[in-house]
Image (cartoon, rainbow, N blue to C red):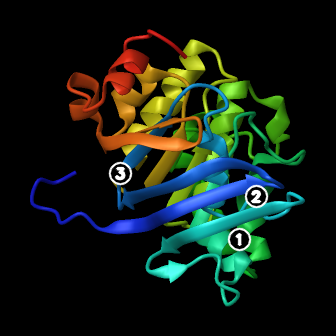
């Protein structure tokens, strides 16, 4: 992040509460996400990290008996407004899951999938986007001679980078990552981390991670959640060196969680 660059908020969450029936899982979370930064959401299992992440592109909508209040603004627009076009929102706010989830067809067709759904028919443009996205996700070298090969035939780490390329192909502004390396071996994890480090100058990433070392290595901002509350958020290095709250310090130093 350039020192002279003014922070622009891409997503702003204001007092977001979420309940399943009578059980409240998120108790009023307010947090801003800055453009071209990677924000890590950390906290013990079951603290609401993934639940909150899924609110940011309305992935929780299909769950029965769910109630979400508060506001989430994407570029100033309320994403829960009845006027919000969900397809458009998910084009702008992409998602990569914990388990690599390439579709069971070729690498090329995986990356082209979103473009075709968006109605792009120009083969030259699709070819160009496929190559560009695979390069951005640092998986071009392994796939360029195997674009017709089934994406599920690659290793877990390669599959996850194919999924990142698929998310990038439609040029989203934000990519949500739900523990993108937790199912991977250490070498594949570090390859995905390197990819994200390179990409965060061009995209806004919001990543749930259990791995505190990973959050410390690659995020610009960290938000610590516990029991459905946002305990503290701020610049990663400041939080890791001098957290404002004792409970954050205890968590970061492995005293619980």
In the image, residue 213 above or below residue 75 = above
**Relative image position of residue 121 (x, y in whole percent):** 75, 80
Q: Considering only order in the chain, which callout, 3 or 2, is on the residue closer to the N terminus? A: 3
Q: Separation of disc 2 and disc 1 at Cα?
A: 24 Å
Choose the circle earlier in sequence order: 2 or 1: 2
Residue 115: x, y in percent? Answer: 71, 71
Closer to us: mark 3 or mark 1? 3
Q: Where does label 3 land, which residue?
A: 37
The residue drawn where x is 56% and y is 61% is 16
> Alpha carbon of mark 3 to alpha carbon of mark 1: how far?
25 Å
**Residue 150: which quarter of the image?**
top right
Residue 70, image x and y in percent? 56, 69
Residue 59 visible in this rendered orientation of the protein: yes
Which mark, by number, is residue 115?
1
Describe the element under mark 3 as helix, strand or loop.
Answer: loop
Q: Secondary structure at mark 1?
A: helix
Front position in the image: 184 or 84: 84
The residue furthest bottom is 83
State the residue position of label 2: 60
Apparent side of residue 16 relative to residue 146 in the rendered image (left or right) = left
């Amino acid at each position: 992040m350039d020192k002279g660059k003014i922070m622009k908020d891409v997503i702003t969450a204001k007092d977001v509460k979420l309940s399943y029936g009578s059980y409240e899982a998120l108790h009023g979370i307010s947090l801003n996400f800055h453009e071209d930064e990677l924000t890590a959401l950390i906290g013990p299992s079951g603290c609401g990290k993934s639940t909150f992440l899924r609110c940011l592109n309305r992935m929780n909508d299909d769950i029965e008996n769910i109630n979400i209040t508060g506001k989430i603004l994407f570029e100033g627009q309320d994403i829960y407004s009845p006027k919000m076009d969900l397809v458009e929102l998910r084009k702008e706010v992409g998602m990569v899951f914990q388990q690599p989830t390439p579709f069971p067809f070729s690498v090329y067709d995986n990356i082209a999938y979103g473009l075709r759904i968006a109605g792009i028919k120009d083969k030259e443009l699709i070819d160009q986007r496929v190559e560009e996205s695979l390069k951005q996700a640092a998986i071009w070298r392994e796939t360029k001679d195997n674009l017709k090969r089934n994406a599920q035939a690659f290793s877990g780490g390669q599959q996850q980078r194919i999924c990142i390329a698929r998310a990038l192909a439609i040029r989203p502004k934000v990519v949500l990552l739900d523990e993108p390396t937790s199912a991977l071996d250490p070498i594949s994890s570090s390859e995905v981390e390197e990819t994200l480090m390179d990409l965060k100058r061009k995209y806004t990433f919001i990543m749930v991670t259990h791995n505190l070392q990973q959050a410390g290595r690659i995020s610009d901002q960290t938000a610590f959640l516990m029991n459905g509350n946002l305990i503290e958020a701020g610049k990663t290095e400041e939080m890791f060196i001098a957290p404002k709250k004792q409970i954050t310090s205890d968590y970061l130093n492995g005293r619980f969680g």
